[in-house]
Image (cartoon, helix red, strand yellow):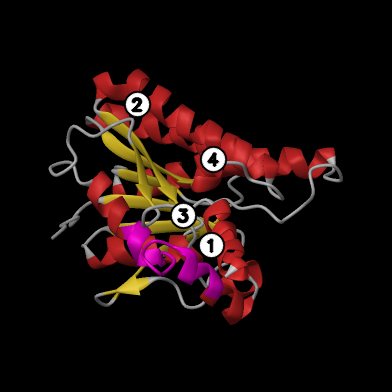
Amino acid sequence: MFDFSGKIVIVTGGGKGVGYGISEAFLAAGAEVFICGRRQPQPLPQANGRSAIFFAVDVREPDATQGLIDAVLQHSGRLDVLINNAGGSPPVDAASASPKLTEAVIRLNLIAPLICAQQAYHAMQPQGGGSIINIASVSGQRPSPGTTAYGAAKAGLINATRSLAQEWGSHNVRVNAIIAGLIKTEAANDHYGGSAGIKLIEESLPMQRMAVPADIANACLFLADNTKAAYISGAALEVYGGGEPPSFLQLARQAHALGQ
């Protein structure tokens, strides 16, 4: 369905979880994929006998991300797609979060994608355009207790996506976001309370399952396609299977059952 043969793609945080799935999907579609992270994954993302190329980069360091883009340009001569995927946050109560942690979360989830996007724009604009996709979160659309700074950063990223799309549209640099819901990755057991917690959560969701990395990857392939998504820029594509039902509905059903 998607052909990215000859296209050059960077996926930040492409060595694990959702980023790993995105990297594999673009490799399978024919792209040359560069990934970055603080530690090299084993094995590297691969498909059709080809592997991603890894660079050790902390995306919170602007000089390091500029070095990554410069290396990709030197190696391949162009940059077609940037996926700003690196992100995350430990759970922490807002009343006890240290200023240092709050700043680090904002740097990783908002400032780093903004700077990477700016650097990618300067690589894409002279070649006639490109596609930038920011991986946001449902936490940026609804309250995010326990990860307040993360939710605020993702809300900012959604807004920034729309602003950048307007600023850079005349240069054919499309900027979109994916609003990801709950995703089952290798870290899901720790994050969602083990297999029992995952089962309970999935039973509460409209489609009776969490997303998997391939769901996010397929959305990235679509948004990055300059033919199928040629006029899509500034979009925030919700990939969360209908969303999270309001908790009061389940509580009301439980109360009704107890009343009987």
For the point 19% across and 41% down, the residue is 229
Mark 3 crowdedness (10 Å alpha carbons): few <14, some 14-19, many ≥20: many
Most foreground residue, 258 or 153: 258
SS category of the residue bearing label 2: helix
Q: Residue 223 lies in what quarter of the image?
A: top left
Q: Which mark is residue 189?
A: none
Name the N-terminal-most of marks 4 and 2: 4
Name the N-terminal-most of marks 4 and 3: 4
Mark 3 or 1: the one toward you: 1
- Position of the N terminus by quadrant: bottom left
Q: Which residue is mark 1?
A: 253
| Cα gap from disc 3 to disc 2, whole angstroms | 23 Å
* Relative to 62, residue 71 above or below: below
* Residue 205 painted magenta: yes
For the point 25% across and 58% down, the residue is 31
| Cα gap from disc 4 to disc 1, whole angstroms | 28 Å
Question: Which three-letter amino acid code belongs to the residue tagged 2?
Answer: Ala
Name the N-terminal-most of marks 2 and 1: 2
| Cα gap from disc 4 to disc 3, whole angstroms | 10 Å
Q: Position of residue 9 (x, y in %)?
A: 33, 51
Mark 4 or 2: the one toward you: 4
Q: Which residue is mark 2?
A: 165
Mark 4 or 1: the one toward you: 1
Q: Which residues are magenta?
A: 200-217
| Cα gap from disc 2 to disc 1, whole angstroms | 43 Å
Q: Position of residue 157 (x, y in %)?
A: 51, 35
Mark 1 crowdedness (10 Å alpha carbons): few <14, some 14-19, many ≥20: few
Q: Which residue is mark 4?
A: 140
Name the N-terminal-most of marks 4 and 1: 4
Q: Which residue is mark 3?
A: 181
Q: Residue 161 lies in what quarter of the image?
A: top left
Mark 4 crowdedness (10 Å alpha carbons): few <14, some 14-19, many ≥20: many
